[in-house]
Image (spheres, rainbow, N blue to C red):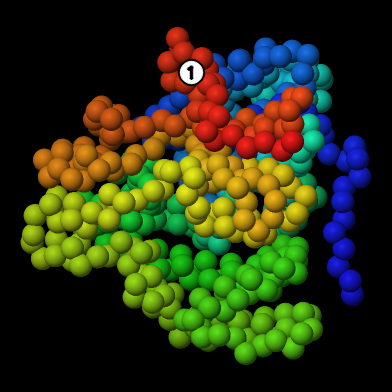
Amino acid sequence: MAIEILNIPPGGVPQFDELYVISDLHLGGSPDFQIFNSGAELARLIDFLRVRNPDRKLALLINGDFVDFLAELPAHHFDPAGAVDKLRRIAQDPAFAPVFGALKDFAAQDNRQLVLTLGNHDLEFALPWVRANLLEILTGNNGQARGQITLAFDGAGFRCKIGNATVLCVHGNEVDPWNLADYERIRRLGREVIQGRPIESWIPNAGSQLVIDIMNDLKHKFPFVDLLKPETQAAVPILLALAPDQHDKLRAIGSTVRRLAWDKIRSATGFLGAAEQQGDLVGRTMAATDLLSNGTPNSFGTGDLATDRQQYAGSLLDDAEEMFNRDVSAVSLIGTDQLGSYLGLTSAIMRMFKGADTSEVLREALSDLRKDRSFDPTVEDSTFQLMDEQVGAGIDFIVSGHTHLARAMTRKKQPGWYFNSGTWARLIKLEDRVLSNADEFKNVFNAFKQGTMQALDAYPELVMRRLSVVAIWADNAGTHGELRQASLLPAEPILPEAPELRFTKV
C-alpha cells in the first residue's frame, strides 16, 4: 500500500506574527525542594510579552513540565485523584503565584494566545478534570481569556505558522525511552473515571518510577541531583561519594532499566498506545532488540512490515518473558562500558570505597567533565538527533525541551532548524576552574554535602540560571528563529537579541 504524506489544509493550524517558547519550569515541591526560583523574572517576561506590539498576534507557549506533580507530596507516579489539590497548592505557593498571576493577565489581553503542551512531569494535565481546574486558575472563568488559551495535551505537540514558516513544538520525552508516555492509556483512564468505573494504579514510564521510587528521597537529602548536568557523568558519581549507604538504591536503577526495556518493547510493537509510524517502528524495534539481545542483530526482514512486526513482537515478548521468569537483572544486559556511563562507576570511585580521599578521588573521576560540552547550544545531543530523524519534512522549526539544555542548530535529515528551549530551573555545571583546583573542588564538594538548596545558592558562581527563550517572529525579511536568554537584572532589557543563534527562512 502506498504511503502518502498528508498536508494539513490552509487554516488548519493557527497563524501568529510572533511566538515565544519556554519550557521545564517545574513549578512544584516544598520550599526546600523547589528547583524553580525565577518567579519575578518570569512574571516580568510574561508582562513584557503581554503589552509588546499590541497590534501583532503573539503567542506564549510553555512547552511541557510547566508544573511538577512528581515533586508534590504525597508523591505518586501518576495521581488522578490528588492532581487538582496539588495544582491548586502550586498556584498559591508564594514562589509560583506571581507566574500564575502574570499568565492570567496575559490570557485576558487582546491579540495574545497562551499555549501549553504536555511534559512527562505534568501528565495529569491530560485528564479532563485537571484541565478544567487549570483553565479556571488561568482565567477566573473569563470567557474571552478561555478562548485565548490552547491546551495541547494529547501528545501530538503544537503546530502553527509564523509568517512563511511552519513550527512544531513538542516537549521531547517523545524520543526519550525513559519517559515515553502512553497518551491513549491516559485517555482511557479519564473516560473510566468520568463514567464511574474503577481504575487500577498505574506507573506511566520508567522515568516516573525512577523519580518516585528512588530519586525523590535522594533529592531531599542532596538537592543538587536535580540541578547538576550531565547526570550520569556527574550527579551519580557524586551521590556515590556522598552517600555510599545509598549504593543499593542507586543500583536499583537497574530494576527501572528493566521497566525501560519493557516500555521499549511495547512502543516498538504498538502496545504503547496507538501504533507508531512505520518509519519509527523499525528504528525503535531495532533498539529494543539490541537492548534485549545485548547487541545481537535480528534475523528478520521479510520485506512485509506487518509480518516483520509480528515476528519482532513474538521474539521480543518471548525473550522478555524468559528474562522476567529467570529474574535476570536488566543491568546485566548492558555492556560493561555502557554500565559505567549509566551508573558512573569508574575505577576512581572504586578506589574511594577502599579508603582513598573522597574529594580528591572524586575530582579525578570527574576529570573528563573538563571537556564536557553539554551546555554548548550548538552541540548535537541525542534529543536533537532523534527529533531530526523522526520529524518529517515540511516543519521549518522544531522546538523541544525536556533536557534542560538549550540548543540552536540546523537540521541534518531535513531542511529546517532545531531549538531546545532549555529550562527556567536552576542548573549546576562543574566548571574547569573547579575541577582543575583541588581546594576549590573540595569546597564545592562540601557545599554538596550540606544537603540544602540554600548552601548551593550561597556558594559563589555554582548555581546558574539560564532563562532560555526561543523567539520566532515574522517580518518583511522572512521568518526568524532565535535562542535568547531573559535578563536577570531589572535594569537591563528583558529579552535581548542573540543574532549569533538566529536562523531565517526567507
Q: Is residue 146 left or right of residue 248?
A: right
- Mark 1 is surrounded, within 10 Å at the Cα level, by few (under 14), some (14 to 19) or many (20 or more) other residues, namely some
Which residue is identified by label 1? 40
Q: Is residue 81 left or right of residue 445?
A: right
Residue 53: quadrant of the picture:
top right
Q: Quadrant of the N terminus?
A: bottom right
Relative height, residue 339 to residue 305 (above, below): above
Q: Quadrant of the C terminus?
A: top right
Which residue is at a point 60% across and 59% down the rendered structure image? 386
Can residue 189 be seen in this snapshot?
Answer: no
Q: Nearer the viewer, residue 461 or 38?
A: 461
Residue 373 position in % (x across, y down): 39, 48
Q: Nearer the viewer, residue 299 or 311?
A: 299
Q: Nearer the viewer, residue 76 or 172?
A: 172
Relative height, residue 462 to residue 113 (above, below): below
Residue 326: quadrant of the picture:
bottom left
Residue 264: quadrant of the picture:
bottom right
Q: Is residue 266 left or right of residue 420?
A: right
> How many numbered tags mark residues here?
1
Residue 262 position in % (x across, y down): 56, 71
Can residue 4 be seen in this snapshot?
Answer: yes
Which residue is at a point 50% across and 24% down the rendered structure image? 486
Residue 203 position in % (x across, y down): 56, 58
Q: Of helix, strand and loop, which one carries label 1?
A: helix
Which residue is at a point 61% across and 15% down the rendered structure image? 47
Relative height, residue 284 to residue 42 (above, below): below
Residue 440 position in % (x across, y down): 15, 39
Outermost residue on the top side: it is 491
Amino acid found under the numbered disc labelled 1: Ala
Which residue is at a point 36% across and 32% down the rendered structure image? 464
Q: Is residue 278 left or right of residue 346?
A: right
